[in-house]
Amino acid sequence: MSTISVKVPDPIMSAIAERAKNSGYSDVNEFVSQFILRISERQNEVEELAIKGLQSGPSEPWDGKEIDAIRERLKSKHGS
């Protein structure tokens, strides 16, 4: 296993350590490793979805009603 060294400001390190603890990780190293792994996996998923979208054929522009409906769904799901 390889090791990297990253310098972060103390307040950020404290936040990372707190999040690792609250998330049940044994230490910051395990938390950061898993976090990076999840980012990498998510990036792969996004790339696959983008490729599928490009391969699905030409798109058509949304009209104002469709955009408003999307906004309303997002507002009801996430607030504001």
Image: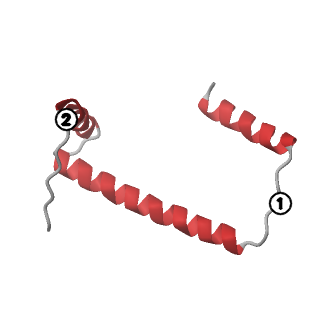
Mark 1, residues whose alpha carbon is within 10 Å: few (<14), some, or many (≥20)?
A: few
Coloration of the structure image: secondary structure
Three-letter amino acid code of the residue under disc 2: Pro
- Disc 1 marks which residue? 60
Earlier-in-chain disc, 1 versus 2: 2
Task: Name the secondary structure under disc 2.
Answer: loop
Residue 29, image x, y percentages = 17, 50
- Give the residue at x 51% y 64%: 45
Q: Residue furthest top?
A: 80
Residue 63, image x, y percentages = 86, 47
Query: Vertical placement of 25 versus 17: above or below?
Result: below
Mark 2, residues whose alpha carbon is within 10 Å: few (<14), some, or many (≥20)?
A: few
- Give the residue at x 32% y 51%: 35
- Give the residue at x 42% y 62%: 41
- Disc 2 marks which residue? 9
Please give left or right for residue 27 compared with residue 44 in the image: left
Looking at the rendering, in which quadrant would you find the N terminus?
A: bottom left
The mark tally for this picture is 2
